[in-house]
Image (cartoon, grey):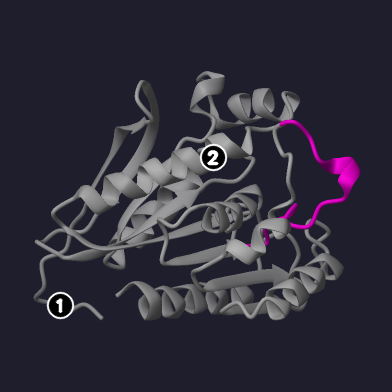
Amino acid sequence: MTRTDEYEGMLAETVMVRVGDDDFIHAYLARPPGPGPFPGVVLLHHMPGWDDWYKEATRTFASRGYLAIAPDLYCRAGHGTPDEVAAIVRADGGVPDEHVVADADAAAELLRASPLSNGKVGVFGTCSGGRHAYLTACRSDAFAAVVDLWGGGVVMAKEDLTEKKPVAPIDYTIDLMCPLLGLFGADDRSPPVEQVAIHEAELQRLGKNYEFHIYPDAGHGFFYHQRPAMYRPEQAIDGWNKVWSFLAQHLA
């Protein structure tokens, strides 16, 4: 909790992240003032793209004392408004899973390289970004915690697999080595509660450290305050509080 005589501020800016030897993507970076050390969070955006909600969320994490970075997972598809770029990516069948994991790893590496870092980084995502967050946490050892908010496509039928999505993320669950928080809406269809139950059963079978919460009277995107038809204030407030508590426990 802040004090009324405390200085407040943050630095928020667009940066370049090096991925591999000769690839670069944009990212939005926000950090609190002071010497730290601060925990880090990589935010993986949803299919609407690298948009205002994700940049606002990145600043919100910084205001809570995190080094926060949101890489533009669609950077290679071109530039324009978030809706324009997302339409290009959607028409092309999405971005390759291997690119997402590499981008998230590179963003985490940038945070850990900061002299302000405490060395711990979590990964957070909503919608397709929730799927990507879970996939990344299973495929990478860079993360100390993962937050999956209504990530559809963790459970996939064989006929839904593609060249860009060759393996369902649930099939990597055995490799998940960090704690997981999952928040879902009871009325969501992506993922439906039936798929959430399948995911939870696999986590239980493999003895993973996780907590799942399913909110009644909430569908897809119930955190999105800019979308009145989707937003559920009571559930969103409780959900954010669970996010802050979970990350404080595992990244502080």
Q: Is 162 covered by the magenta stretch? A: yes
| x 81%, y 70%: residue | 198
- Residue 4's disc is 1
Name the foreground residue: 215 vs 95: 95
Rendered location of residue 142, percent (x, y) = 40, 56
| x 45%, y 38%: residue | 103
Q: Secondary structure at mark 2?
A: helix
Disc 2 crowd rating (10 Å Cα; few below 14, some 14-19, many 20+) is: many
* Lower position in the chain sequence, tag 2 or tag 1: 1
Give the magenta-colored segment's residue range: 149-163
| x 64%, y 41%: residue | 47
Q: CA distance from mark 2 to mark 1?
A: 41 Å
- Residue 100's disc is 2
Give the image quarter of residue 170.
bottom right
In this rendering, position of residue 151 left or right of residue 125: right
Q: Is 93 covered by the magenta stretch? A: no
The prevailing secondary structure element of the residues shown in magenta is loop
Quarter occupied by the C terminus: bottom left
Task: Identify whether 132 is placed above or below 100.
Answer: below
Rendered location of residue 97, percent (x, y) = 62, 39
